[in-house]
Image (tube, rainbow, N blue to C red):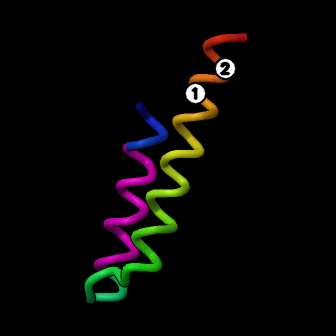
Amino acid sequence: MMRQELTKSLVDECQSKLDRELTNKELELIQWISERQLELQFSQKSS
């Protein structure tokens, strides 16, 4: 959960610094990173 909050705060910070909407490519990258984090969490729980 902490990692998701950290990711969200990083995204928010980047968005405010850039002062614009994130592009589709950036959103895809953020989503991909989030999915990898979830996969890591599941693999850690199962081991």
User: Which quadrant of the structure image shows residue 21?
Assistant: bottom left
Q: Which residue is mark 1?
A: 41
User: Which quadrant of the structure image shows residue 47?
Assistant: top right
Residue depicted at 40% across the width and 70% down the height: 27
In x, y percent, where is residue 36? 59, 45
Image: 46 above or below 38: above
Q: Amino acid at mark 2?
A: Gln
Q: Amino acid at mark 1?
A: Gln
| Foreground pick, 19 / 37 | 37
User: Which quadrant of the structure image shows residue 10?
Assistant: bottom left
Q: Residues within 10 Å of mark 1 (few under 14, many from 20)?
A: few
| Foreground pick, 5 / 22 | 22
Residue depicted at 31% across the width and 66% down the height: 12
Residue depicted at 52% across the width and 35% down the height: 38
Image: 6 above or below 39: below
- Labelled disc at residue 44: 2
Query: Which portion, as a residue range, is magenta?
Result: 5-16
In x, y percent, where is residue 28? 45, 68
| Mark 1–mark 2 distance (CA, rounded to whole Å) | 5 Å
* Most common secondary structure along the magenta stretch: helix
Q: Are marks 1 and 2 in contact (CB under 8 Å)?
A: yes
In x, y percent, where is residue 4? 42, 42
Image: 12 above or below 19: above
Image quadrant containing the N terminus: top left
